[in-house]
């Protein structure tokens, strides 16, 4: 069964036959409980956008493991320029296949230097669908994403200031309609202090069928 581990902030490790990491900010991430050397050998590295708390250690990990970086076209070109051999540039649209895993880039309402910020839909080999929203404000795109995909696990930012806050993430969960939602991108900096239990409590009223998983950094669950 695929195992998902939260490494703090927006970083998640998905361990299946293929190991995938999303937004690998390990060094300098005050929430990350492990060092770079403790990150297992990776095959795919997904980067939602080029801000330091997301691009993080992606380039060094890609070089260490000869892993593929999957990102918006312009960011993939940038990391290629930094010496990453396997950079797969894509764009917002339909599914693509990388080693039997399906990926879809989704719009995110945010900023960045290279290309545009995105979220990722990930369809694992067993058909389970994971959605990592990236850094984003609330967008009506969530409704379309929810209609087009049966999402098993959604990772949504709740910290405010740079992204959605709890209220917006609650409405996002309502329209995305995932089986499980995991709050992220909170508590790392003073500006994004948020209590995930409030998120959980609000959803109990509004969308009780969605399971809210509040993880501690380093904590895992299987899907
Ligand atoms: Ni950002
Ligand atoms: Mn961020």
Image (cartoon, helix red, strand yellow):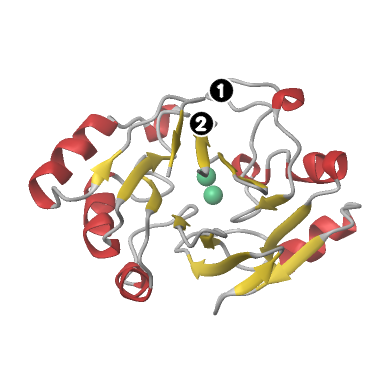
Image position of 160 with respect to 32: above or below: below
Image position of 45 with respect to 74: above or below: above
Instruction: Judge from the rendering whether residue 207 lies leftward or rightward of residue 217; answer left or right.
Output: left
Image position of 126 with respect to 162: above or below: below
Q: Residue at x 52, y 34 (%)?
A: 5
Q: Residue at x 55, y 69 (%)?
A: 104
Q: Position of residue 81 (x, y in %)?
A: 89, 58
- The crowd level at tag 1 (other Cα within 10 Å; few <14, some 14-19, many 20+) is few
Any atom of ligand 2 within 8 Å of the CB at mark 2?
A: no
Q: Is residue 22 visible?
A: no
Q: Nearer the viewer, residue 116 or 142?
A: 142
Q: Nearer the viewer, residue 167 or 210?
A: 210
Q: Secondary structure at mark 1?
A: loop
- Kindly report which numbered mark, 1 or 2, lies closer to the viewer in this rendering: 2
Q: Which residue is mark 2?
A: 8
Q: Which mark is residue 30?
A: 1
Q: Position of residue 185 (x, y in %)?
A: 44, 39
Name the image quarter holding residue 103.
Answer: bottom right
Q: Secondary structure at mark 2?
A: loop
Q: Are marks 1 and 2 in contact (CB under 8 Å)?
A: yes
Name the image quarter holding residue 98.
Answer: bottom right
Instruction: Judge from the rendering whether residue 64 lies leftward or rightward of residue 157; answer left or right.
Output: right
């Amino acid at each position: 069964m695929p195992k998902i581990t939260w490494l703090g902030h927006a970083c998640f490790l998905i361990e299946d036959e293929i190991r995938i990491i999303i937004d690998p900010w390990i060094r300098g991430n005050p929430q990350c409980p492990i060092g770079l050397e403790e990150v297992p050998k990776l095959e795919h590295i997904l980067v939602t956008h080029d801000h330091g708390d997301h691009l993080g250690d992606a380039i060094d990990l890609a070089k260490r493991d000869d892993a593929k970086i999957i990102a918006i076209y312009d960011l993939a070109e940038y990391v290629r320029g930094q010496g990453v051999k396997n950079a797969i540039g894509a764009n917002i649209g339909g599914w693509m296949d990388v080693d039997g895993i399906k990926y879809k880039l989704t719009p995110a309402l945010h900023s960045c230097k290279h290309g545009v910020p995105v979220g990722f839909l990930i369809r694992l080999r067993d058909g389970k669908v994971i959605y990592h929203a990236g850094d984003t404000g609330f967008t009506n795109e969530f409704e379309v994403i929810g209609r087009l995909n049966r999402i098993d696990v959604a990772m949504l930012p709740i910290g405010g200031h740079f992204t959605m806050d709890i209220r917006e993430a609650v409405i996002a969960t309502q329209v995305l309609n995932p089986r499980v939602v995991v709050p992220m991108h909170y508590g790392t900096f003073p500006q994004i202090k948020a209590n995930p239990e409030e998120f959980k409590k609000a959803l109990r009223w509004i969308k009780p069928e969605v399971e809210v998983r509040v993880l501690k950094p380093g904590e895992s669950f299987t899907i």
